[in-house]
Amino acid sequence: MQLIDTHVHLNFDVLATDLEAIRSRWREAGVVRLVHSCVHPGEFQEIRAIADRVEELSFAVGLHPLDTEKWTDGSAGEILELARSDGRVVAIGEMGLDFYKADDEARQKQVFTAQLEIARQLDKPVIIHCRDAAAPMAELLRDFCDRSGAVRGVMHCWGGTPEETQWFLDLGFYISFSGTVTFKKATPIQESARIVPSDRLLVETDCPFLAPVPKRGKRNEPAHVKYVAERVAELRDTSPESLSQQTTRNACQLFGLSLPEESQTSKVEKSKVKTSF
């Protein structure tokens, strides 16, 4: 069984200091590709350094909506050039709107729109963070697409209702579920996981955050994406193997990823190869 964790933050200290063992565990769990998200462009060099050592890692570059104070007149150009500088950059993000605690809605929309323009220019997908902002997010994306043309991407760590989910499906987006889908009281998220078409479904950990049941309350890591896949498969009345195959195919389609040869993957899993960092 092959899995792709479509959203990780391996550069955070809680993971970066233990990366050799973490990598061994995700390989044992069948994780063959990962997409590393970016909170702000200042992370780019350390993310790229990790990718230099972890060949299965692709990554993004962008600015998180809770970091808009770091946006300057030169930020758009910086993101554009960084995205062009490395062929392993497969997306722009993470970017989006987060109105949970923030009071800078206009600023967030400005920064988000600027990054959508970059993604359009480069023909890359976007990784979208959306918290307590589904309606304004959908409206902004509709307006942008009407004005500039369609964008493609993923609503990451999705936490919306089925109605909100349908808004973004109608816009052509993929929907990615994280450990929150395993939480006991996450009924709206679980209902959303049931309605997403098979060819628009992704899974992720968003590690080191939001560890899924049965690891909830502990440090999250890419190996735990298997628990997300198992829960989503259960919700959709399908097998984990079928769910993993479909979400892996979807991730390859969205991010332009290729898979290792099955024989090579099996060899790695059997020998439990560890790479020195």
Image: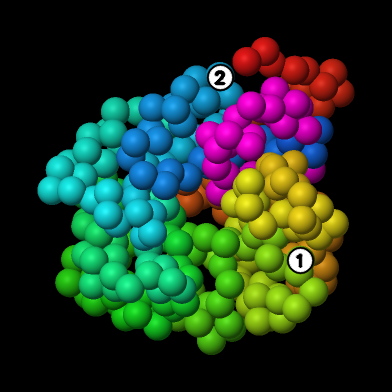
Residue 184 included in the magenta stretch of the image: no
Residue type marked 2? Arg
x and y, in percent, of residue 263 in the image: 76, 25
Most extreme residue toward the top, as rendered? 276
Q: Residues within 10 Å of mark 1 (few under 14, many from 20)?
A: many
Q: Which mark is residue 182?
A: 1
Tell me: 211 left or right of 121. right
Mark 1–mark 2 CB contact (< 8 Å)? no
Q: Reply above or below: 63 against 31.
A: below
> Would residue 105 be seen by someone viewing this image from the given angle?
yes
Residue drawn at x 56%, y 77% is 160
- In the rendered image, the quadrant that contains the N terminus is top right
Q: Residues within 10 Å of mark 2 (few under 14, many from 20)?
A: few
The Cα–Cα distance between marks 1 and 2, rounded to whole angstroms, is: 31 Å
Tell me: 94 left or right of 35. left
Residue 268 image-quadrant placement: top right
- In the rendered image, the quadrant that contains the C terminus is top right
According to the picture, the residue beneath numbered tag 2 turns out to be: 53
Q: Earlier in the sequence, mark 1 or mark 2?
A: 2
Residue type marked 1? Thr
x and y, in percent, of residue 19 in the image: 66, 27
Residue drawn at x 78%, y 33% is 25
Q: Find numbered disc 1 in the image and state the secondary structure of the residue it sits on.
A: helix
Residue drawn at x 38%, y 59% is 66
Most extreme residue toward the left, as rendered? 73
Residue drawn at x 78%, y 57% is 216
x and y, in percent, of residue 38 in the image: 43, 44
Tell me: 150 left or right of 7. left
Residue 138 image-quadrant placement: bottom left
Boundaries of the magenta span: 1-25
x and y, in percent, of residue 267 in the image: 80, 21
Residue 17 included in the magenta stretch of the image: yes
